Image (cartoon, rainbow, N blue to C red):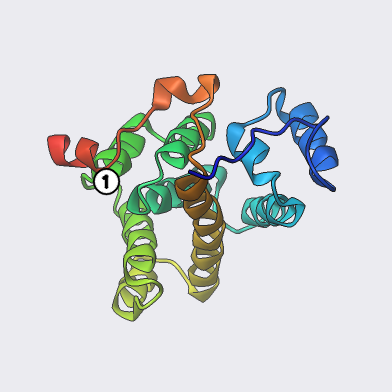
Amino acid sequence: MTEFTLYTPENAPGKSGELLDGALKKMGFLPNLYAKLAESDTALEAYFSLSSLVSKTSFSPAEQQLILLAASVENECNYCVAAHSSGARMAKLDKDVIEAVRTGNPIADERLEALRKFTEALVITRGHAKGEMEAFIAAGFDRKNVMEVVLCVSMKTLSNYSNHLIDTPLDAALQRMEWTGKSELQQTG
């Protein structure tokens, strides 16, 4: 079986070492996703660029995390579900909302539920979600928001699919937010 290396700033190939060093200084630790994405400095740079662009969307940090979490749940990415559950807490997204997304239960806040449903529909239908888009807009969102959700899902496609292929181990910092996958949904849903 092909194994991928958990690189450090010192041994990463190409420009990845510099990118990892910057992430380490910014975050105080080096997430395993970054360490494995470093196999390709282009993929790592793309992830960082998309992440920066997501932070510039018109969505609040809590809404951004909700989108990223919902996409990760639909893509069944255990690593990213844990990471964005933690990120959502830091962004002050209500714990009940986080738990609802993780377990597939409805969110009480109608606006956030519309955001979650549209995100899920984009992932499930691979973008063929015009009906869900109309419901999303009817819930108070606009065309700009539609494109920004697509951007967020694009970022998660890169990391979720990569994690599936490279078996990224969960960081110690994310252990408390571990997600067991669709089995968690079936047990509580």
Residue visible at 60% across and 32% down in the picture: 32
Q: In the visual, does 7 lie left or right of 80?
A: right
Residue 120 higher or lower than 112, as above or below: below
Residue visible at 64% across and 36% down in the picture: 5
Q: Position of residue 181 (x, y in %)?
A: 29, 39
Query: Which of these two is toward me, 65 or 162?
Result: 162
Snapshot quadrant of residue 21: top right
Q: In the visual, does 184 lie left or right of 17?
A: left
Q: Which residue is mark 1?
A: 107
Callout 1 secondary element: loop
Snapshot quadrant of residue 114: bottom left
Residue 76 higher or lower than 124, as above or below: above
Residue visible at 81% across and 36% down in the picture: 22
Residue 86 higher or lower than 189, as above or below: above
Residue visible at 68% across and 28% down in the picture: 30
| Residue 45 in sight from this viewpoint | yes
Query: Which of these two is toward me, 174 or 66?
Result: 174
Q: Amino acid at mark 1?
A: Ile
Q: Position of residue 96 (x, y in %)?
A: 30, 33
Q: In the visual, does 51 lie left or right of 102?
A: right
Q: Position of residue 107 (x, y in %)?
A: 27, 46
| Residue 189 in sight from this viewpoint | no
Q: Position of residue 23 (x, y in %)?
A: 75, 35
- The quarter of the image holding the C terminus is top left
Q: Residues within 10 Å of mark 1 (few under 14, many from 20)?
A: some
